[in-house]
Image (spheres, rainbow, N blue to C red):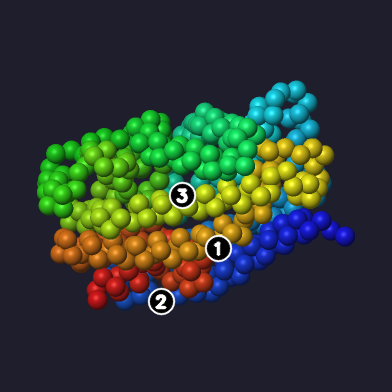
Amino acid sequence: MMNPFLFFILTVLILQYLLDLVVDVLELRSLNPVLPNTFRDVYDEEKYASSQRYTRVQTRFGQARSSLSLIVTIGFILVGGFSTVDMVARRLGQGSIVTGLIFTGILFVLSSLFSLPFSVYFTFVIEERFGFNRTTLKIFILDLIKGTLLSVLLGAPLLAMLLWFFESTGEFAWLYSWIGLSLFTFVMQFLAPVLIMPLFNKFTPLEDGELKEKIIAYAQEQDFSLEGIYTMDGSKRSTRLNAFFTGFGRFRRIIFFDTLLEKLEDDEVVVVLAHEMGHFKRKHILKMMGTSLLQSGLMFFILSLFLGNEQLFAAFGMENISIYASLTFFLFLYAPISSLISIFFNIFSRKYEYEADVWAVETTGKGKALISGLQKLSVHNLSNLTPHPLNVFLNYSHPPVLERVREIEE
């Protein structure tokens, strides 16, 4: 008789794969070759056809990756791959926490090696084919090295802390772990813009001029403090357009990709800023962070119920029971709960996007500028204008652009 945990894990992996496959098929079938009227002034037929080709290529690439990932994951479980990694880590004769770091580190390396060819192909073949890629091989390798070093320097101490809590603090270990992770996440909100992001990109204060004056005037009008307004050299990796906020309170920064400033008019940039500001003013950021913290607390509590479960370890062919392996195996059990929670997060996220659009239009009076800005973002990023509703429901954190435009017009 099959181990019940193994049966559950394999069932979840296969059902998730089949669901994704169905969504992909529906997504491809929903592509409409007829250009929507809303975009006729900004999208030519050739560019629109290119966006649909991009959606097809991306989707099929994702299918190939997920198919191979499913095969490798199931194979790794069934042949006792986790047990082999555990034995390698234990042979070094270190304490439980260091052994846990080695165990997790080996799995991280294996996962990274699996993902690397897909990342290379996507960046240098697919993105290159559709005119997005500006990443050189040197930048790609440096990003890989920096990302790996950051994962070690930040991830290892965090994991060591969690392992120590679960090994040393008794029945409330899940609570201490939750508090520790929450504090780490909060601190990183302040450190990331100052210490981490500059490792990958150059941030330059927005030069004086009419655009900066408009932004400052609007921020003062809305009583919104900003530590600074910066441009980021996103163009050294991609031609995509984007903008975002970082930090909290008086440490808030607005970051514009240099590509966005090249393509959007001043009023469009201001109203995009107003949209992002709307998220702060309507407390969307705090609500999502609070909900995320509650979700992580739930995850740690459920995790505490499965620590050291013998049948769970037997499902992975493990000879020895450990806290560090429990953390890894629990992620397989938690996957369906995580998927359900992400659906609810997306529902609220899409609602908040509409509310931020309303804020932007009401506070700037520039509804047409917001529409044209959204249109340009969609065109230059080759966004799919006609996603299938099931894909939107399951995976979209933002409403489809046609629906956003329709709401703004109304």
Q: Residues within 10 Å of mark 1 (few under 14, many from 20)?
A: few
Seen from the viewer's position, the closer of residues 263 and 163 is 163
Query: Which disc, if any, is residue 55?
Result: none
Disc 3 to disc 2, how far (Cα)? 43 Å
Q: Is residue 109 left or right of residue 48?
A: right
Residue drawn at x 24%, y 74% as measured from the top left: 409
Q: Which residue is mark 3?
A: 293
Q: Position of residue 301 (x, y in %)?
A: 58, 49
Labelled pair 3, 2 in contact (Cβ < 8 Å): no
SS at mark 3 in the image? helix
Residue drawn at x 57%, y 69% as measured from the top left: 23
The kind of residue on which mark 1 rests is Leu
In this view, 256 is above or below 165: below
First in sequence: mark 2 or mark 1? 2
Q: State the image quarter where residue 193 is shown.
A: top left
Q: Is residue 140 visible?
A: no
Disc 2 to disc 1, how far (Cα)? 34 Å
Q: Which residue is mark 1?
A: 340
Of marks 2 and 1, the one in the foreground? 1
